[in-house]
Image (cartoon, rainbow, N blue to C red):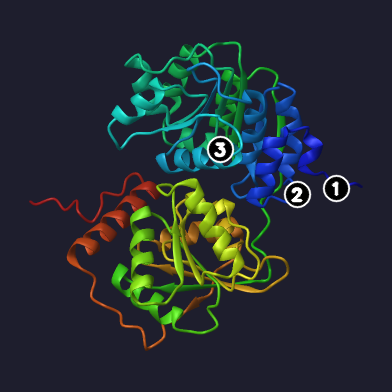
Amino acid sequence: MKEVSFADFKLNRQLLNAVVAIGYEQPTEIQRKCIPVILSGQQVIGIAQTGTGKTAAYLLPILMNVKFAAGNEPRALILAPTKELVIQIAEHARLLAMNTDLRILALYGGIGPKGQIEALQQGVDIVVATPGRFMELYLKGELPTKQVKTLVLDEADRMMDMGFMPQLRKIFEVIPHKRQNLLFSATFPEKVERLAAEFLEFPVRIEVSPPATPAAQVKQVLYLVPNLKSKINFLEYLLQQPEFSRVLIFTRTKENADNVFKFIERKKLGPVRVIHSNKGQNSRINAVNEFKAGALRVLVSTDVTSRGIDVTQVSHVINFDVPIVYEDYVHRIGRTGRAFQTGTAITLANEAELYHVRKIELLIREQIPVNELPPQVAVTETPKEEKQAIAREIDRQKKKEDPLYKGAFHEKKD
């Protein structure tokens, strides 16, 4: 049977060039099954675990249909449950749309709406939003919806778990009824089934098997490191080892990425560059090209920019922070052990991050071996503020798993 390539989907040249530039080789199963159906205008329920390539499975047909910037009002709306996911989807869309003039905007809470309102007023083609911020800006009269032709609900099961149903119903009321609806979910429990029945008409249901486990040629190892300062000490120790010849370091935040970069530069353990969403696209492309060419020893990146890195001969991936979007772990460690080379993926986790490590192990269906820290690494006392932040996060995790849990901070006085 002939292998399907991206060229078989009748995508335009701009998108095909972007797919090549990002380093996608063959479409994944969900992409093979979804792209033609979505391009034909049908409604879709996609059931696929994270790590299967589902984001590009709906983004490529949407970018193909929207094609180029036109007018000022959004024509496609993608809803996702969390700020992190919204930022990630928007970044992924911008990468795929790199050869077009499409205007893609991420809308989420946690920051004031002023900058987002200004961006909307300048015109936008595709909006990626959390339901709460979408409704807030709509009610302010800042978000026109009359041109929306496509609606995507991503991670629908998480949306249901987070209680978004009332907000989603309001959104369905304020966008045109005549539209293409797409729903993606890792699981299909009764709540998601009810949601699908409510807003999809004659959908095509596409289900794919769980994601592949991490490449067998990647050796995974976990170190328990209590705090930020000890992580930095360990990083210094690792980069003093000559076998760490081409190293990718992933952090969860831009701030950590910048700090790790400055530390490596100051200690002269590079050459090193850093990429994240605050860096211009040219700066990011140049950094990746230098890394590919072997001019850099270390590249520091956030998850938002990790998808576009396709480099063979990466000796080590270091997860300085544990990702909270679990599919990102598979993406991160897949940057080493490429093209049949072997590689090592090292994860540093504090006590609060172990929760996410356990969830990642469920996703990849294997346990990550734990190694002792080398005796040469100085383990420092955790500062009071960091200790409290870790304790609060552990509390939040316990509450999430058990809504009746009152928390370590909830001790009633008699």
Q: Are marks 1 and 2 in contact (CB under 8 Å)?
A: yes
Q: How many marks?
A: 3
Q: Disc 2 and disc 3: Cα gap in Å?
A: 18 Å
Q: Are marks 3 and 1 in contact (CB under 8 Å)?
A: no
Residue 132, picture quadrant: top left
Q: Residue at x 72, y 32 (%)?
A: 12
Residue 37, picture quadrant: top right
In terms of depth relative to the viewer, which is nearer, 141 or 294?
294
Q: Where is residue 332? Give x, y as percent.
A: 55, 59
Q: Residue at x 56, y 68 (%)?
A: 367
Q: Give the label on residue 346, or none.
A: none
Q: Disc 1 and disc 2: Cα gap in Å?
A: 8 Å
Is 141 left or right of 340, judged from the image as shown?
left
Q: Give the label on residue 3, or none.
A: 1
Mark 2, residue position = 26
Question: Amino acid type of disc 3?
Answer: Ala
In terms of depth relative to the viewer, which is nearer, 257 or 185?
257
Q: Give the label on residue 93, or none.
A: 3
Specify few, some or many for label 1: CA neighbours under 10 Å numbering under 14, 14-19, or 20 or more: few
